[in-house]
Amino acid sequence: MRSGLGRLADTLSNPNFRRYASAQFLHGAGMWAHHLAEVWLVYEITGSAFAVGLTIAVRSGSAVVLAPVAGTLADRMDRRRLLASTQAAKAVVASALALLALAMGEDLPLAALFGAVAVLGVIGAIDTPLRRAFVRDVVMADGVDRAARLHTSVMSVGRFLGSGAAWLFLSLSASWACFAVNGATSLLAATLVLRVVPTTVATTADARAAGGRVLGYLLRTPAVTIPMALLCSFTLFGWNLAVLLPVVADKQLESGGGTFAVLAQAMAIGSLIGSVMMAASKLEGPRSLALLLAVFSATMATLAAVDVLLAGIAAIFVVGIFGGGFLSLSNGSVQSAADPRLQGRVSAAYGVVFVGARAVGGPILGWLVDDFGSRVALVSVGIFTAACAALGLLAAARTRATAQSR
């Protein structure tokens, strides 16, 4: 652990990485303040977990549709300028929504909220693979794994502060302020990204062509595909907690928007701790990911038993630790194993798995919560992710045995 912390310090000593990390922190803080306000508003207006799941599907669905375009753009265009442009576009949309919410208050139409969700989803579809692929432009090749793991830690810090802002503003019934925070932080992030000086030489068109098609590459590269498959099972239901937490706060804990934001903040703190621990650790490979997923599944099931606030905070904190650790390790594993010639397209595929699974799982999980309650849904999620973790362990063992026999 001591040597791992030393490597983290070396990464953070890089001024380029600090600018990149600061931009990611701002992005995470604004995004989560906005996202929590968005989710709570939809739940408050409709009273339906299915509607919340549909909101997530609308936001995430663009990533699936636009993945080929997003990956190609990330490989063929100036990532720095393109990333600054997506952050600036997000700032405009979030600020416009803040002004509309401030002017209309409780009369804010659901259609306007869904429209903003859809537009931000399109921007995010391009922005997400860019942010991951940009890591390789910020640090040297031997630092990609550590930097990619720290990416999750930095986002967790932003998530914590963004959740805190959401708690404050939702408690004051000022959801518009959450949208304004997103607009301001996105603009600052765009400025920081433009100050990054790329440290790697851009890949030529001939080199990209030599890399082949991304689908064929994924099929013959277990070091990338197994982590992605485990990520799919993780995000399909397990990391779709935005669907569950409003109902846990409202029904299980019999409270309101402030409690919802407190639970989200507890999860953010846990996610930060888990991601930092994983960034400093020497754990690697699909087997470690499958084991983390197995422990995560057990912690999800315990959340079903809570009926008081302190127990709920403790349970969601532990969920955050193992969830954040899983995301840190999966992102580092994929980004470091990916062929540099296909970095953008592999990052786009990673984004499809991450947000695409949420888009599919959100409405299903919402239906399950509406019809059977949050407790049954949480236990079901635990059982599903445990089964996927077992399959992941089998796949990792088979891959290792095949490699040893050669």
Image (cartoon, helix red, strand yellow):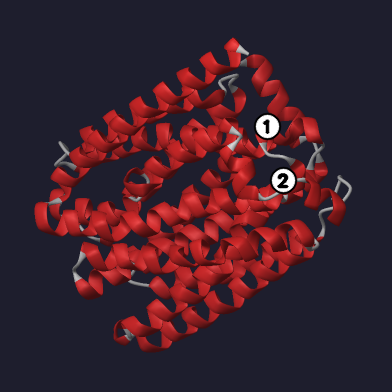
Taking 3 as reference, is 129 above or below it? Answer: below
Q: Is residue 224 visible?
A: yes
The quadrant of the picture occupied by the N terminus is top right
Three-letter code, disc 1: Arg
| Furthest-top residue in this view | 405
Residue 330: percent from the left, percent from the top?
54, 35
Residue 90: percent from the left, percent from the top?
59, 71
Quarter residue 153 falls in? top right
At 41% from the left edge and 22% from the top edge, which residue is drawn? Answer: 393
At 25% from the left edge and 41% from the top edge, which residue is drawn? Answer: 381
Residues packed near mark 1 inside 10 Å, few (<14), some (14 to 19) or many (20 plus): many
Residue 260: percent from the left, percent from the top?
29, 55
Q: Locate residue 271 relative to residue 172 in the image: left or right.
A: right
Three-letter code, disc 2: Val
Residue 83: percent from the left, percent from the top?
70, 63
Taking 142 as reference, is 352 above or below it? Answer: below
- State yes or no: discs 1 and 2 in contact (Cβ < 8 Å): no
Quarter residue 87 falls in? bottom right
- Residue under numbered circle 1: 146
- Residue under numbered circle 2: 135
Q: Between 234 and 276, which is closer to the camera in this rendering?
A: 234
The quadrant of the picture occupied by the C terminus is top right
Helix, strand or loop at disc 1?
helix
Taking 361 as reference, is 334 above or below it? Answer: above
Q: Is residue 204 visible?
A: no
At 48% from the left edge and 80% from the top edge, which residue is drawn? Answer: 97
Q: Which mark is residue 101?
A: none
Helix, strand or loop at disc 2?
helix
Q: Earlier in the sequence, mark 1 or mark 2?
A: 2
